[in-house]
Image (cartoon, rainbow, N blue to C red):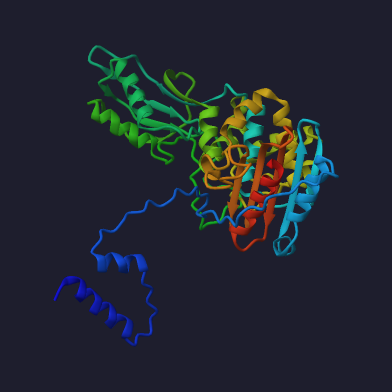
């Protein structure tokens, strides 16, 4: 019996069998088996994912323009139409759109509602960091030594101090460069220990209001590959370079007589890019603590960072007591902001070139990259909307900038709390962006 006939008989047996489980047979696969055709490999589409959720677009309407209405009136009619239905009835929705060209409110809907922002909190952190630190600021990790100078036999009678600046980008290249700098001093033996100076921030290793079952980053000021492994990696690299170390490792603050060996730095824009494009929580918390540690303060805290942000909130004309700043990433259950606050901060950034020029380059672009890569594709919003997404259980948000169809620059914030599924919440955000862009 020919092989294809055997497959046909087996297929018939399966179809005739009285089984309780449902069997789904793909017609293409059946045709391939009976025709002895090779299977085709179909590449899975790339999907941008934030906090474990994929995209769930429901399509986009073709928004009509009423010639009897002004552009602003048409926008209002479109957005009023979008904000109808079950989602708005069963969740908390807040929206605000600001016309940056006219410097006036374009649209608002429950814009003062106090809600959890999820990762659009990173916009607040980024703007505050650039405001306080400037676009030329560097994250810094510095290596010092104590003791006598290196003698003729290559012995350093002293200790190595690694002063952390909470730089999340430290990697193997940095560790090798540090080890090279120690060896360049002529060191072949260190008669001492390696100490970690962790005084850049307080000893809290988790943020206030973080859920225990989330994938939370460890908030340590001395990082390697986003983990608390810096001194271990440096010791290992020194051994590979045949530099012996007689002492162990520990934690101490830097003494006043220590001498600088080398510093490794990464610019604020370098750190902000993955923080915003990929919504990296550790990068956001590292940015947040830089705010509190400005001007060389030791043992900086979340409260110090929040205090500066509260001052900025007051500066943009709002009342800090109406909000709660708990962390820099949006992971905390204790963060409460409003669409109005996010819009006013985006407006403030737009008016300050030194902030805006850095911020705008780090935001995800709809249909192009980051956490917006798979959203709004094939619409007027694709390549136009630059915005930060936000996603945690029950929360979906979007805040950023776009160019409207009349050429005006806009900023916007959309926050939704209480949704059971992220897809419908994101679809509402997408439709608003398309309506503003079309």
Q: Position of residue 64 (x, y in %)?
A: 74, 49
Q: Position of residue 102 (x, y in %)?
A: 81, 31
Which residue is at the far bottom? 18
Name the quadrant of the C terminus: top right
Residue 54 against residue 342 in the figure, above or below: below
Q: Position of residue 240 (x, y in %)?
A: 24, 30
The residue lying at 67 percent from left, 39 percent from top is 306
Q: Seen in the image, is 91 located left or right of residue 163?
A: right
Residue 112 visible to an observer of this rendering: no
Which residue is at the far left? 1
The residue lying at 20 percent from left, 75 percent from top is 5
Query: Where is residue 10, by image quadrant?
Result: bottom left
Q: Seen in the image, is 262 located left or right of residue 291?
A: left
Q: Nearer the viewer, residue 238 or 325?
A: 325
Residue 196 against residue 414 in the figure, above or below: above
Q: Seen in the image, is 327 located left or right of residue 102?
A: left
Q: Nearer the viewer, residue 84 or 396?
A: 84
Q: Nearer the viewer, residue 438 or 409?
A: 438
The residue lying at 62 percent from left, 63 percent from top is 420
Residue 433 visible to an observer of this rendering: yes
Q: Position of residue 369 (x, y in %)?
A: 51, 40
Q: Nearer the viewer, residue 309 or 193?
A: 309
Q: Seen in the image, is 157 located left or right of residue 360?
A: left
Name the quadrant of the N terminus: bottom left
The residue lying at 51 percent from left, 37 percent from top is 274
């Amino acid at each position: 019996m020919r092989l294809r006939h055997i497959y046909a008989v087996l297929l018939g047996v399966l179809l005739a069998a009285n089984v309780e489980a449902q069997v789904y047979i793909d017609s293409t696969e059946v045709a391939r088996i009976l025709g002895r055709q090779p299977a085709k490999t179909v590449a899975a589409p790339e999907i941008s994912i934030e906090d474990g959720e994929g995209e769930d677009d429901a399509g986009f309407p073709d928004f009509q323009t009423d010639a009897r209405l002004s552009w602003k009136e048409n926008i209002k009619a479109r957005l009023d139409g979008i904000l109808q239905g079950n989602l708005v009835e069963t969740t908390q929705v807040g929206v605000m759109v600001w016309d940056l060209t006219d410097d006036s409110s374009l649209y608002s809907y429950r814009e003062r509602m106090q809600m959890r922002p999820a990762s659009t909190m990173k916009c607040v952190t980024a703007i505050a960091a650039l405001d306080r630190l400037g676009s030329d600021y560097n994250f810094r990790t510095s290596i010092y030594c104590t003791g006598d100078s290196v003698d003729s036999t290559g012995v350093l009678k002293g200790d190595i101090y690694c002063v952390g600046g909470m730089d999340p980008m430290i990697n193997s290249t940095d560790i090798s460069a540090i080890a090279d700098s120690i060896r360049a001093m002529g060191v072949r033996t260190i008669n001492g220990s390696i100490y970690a100076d962790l005084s850049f921030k307080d000893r809290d290793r988790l943020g206030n209001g973080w859920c225990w079952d989330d994938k939370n980053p460890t908030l340590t000021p001395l990082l390697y590959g986003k983990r608390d492994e810096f001194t271990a990696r440096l010791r290992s690299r020194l051994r590979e370079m045949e530099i012996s170390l007689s002492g162990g490792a520990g934690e101490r603050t830097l003494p006043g007589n220590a001498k600088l060996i080398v510093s490794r730095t990464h610019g604020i824009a370098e750190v902000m890019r993955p923080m915003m494009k990929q919504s990296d929580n550790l990068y956001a918390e590292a940015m947040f603590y830089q705010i509190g540690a400005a001007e060389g303060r030791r043992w900086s805290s979340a409260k110090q960072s929040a205090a500066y942000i509260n001052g900025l909130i007051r500066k943009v004309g709002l009342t800090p007591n109406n909000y709660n700043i708990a962390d820099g990433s949006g992971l905390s259950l204790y963060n409460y902001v409003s669409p109005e606050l996010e819009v006013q901060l985006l407006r403030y950034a737009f008016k300050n070139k030194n902030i805006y020029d850095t911020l705008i380059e780090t935001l995800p672009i709809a249909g192009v990259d980051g956490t917006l890569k798979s959203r709004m594709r094939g619409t007027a919003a694709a390549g136009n909307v630059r915005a930060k997404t936000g996603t945690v259980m029950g929360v979906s948000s979007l805040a950023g900038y776009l160019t409207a169809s009349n050429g005006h620059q806009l900023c916007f914030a959309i926050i939704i709390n209480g949704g059971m599924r992220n897809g419908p919440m994101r679809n509402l955000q997408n439709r608003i962006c398309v309506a503003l862009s079309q």
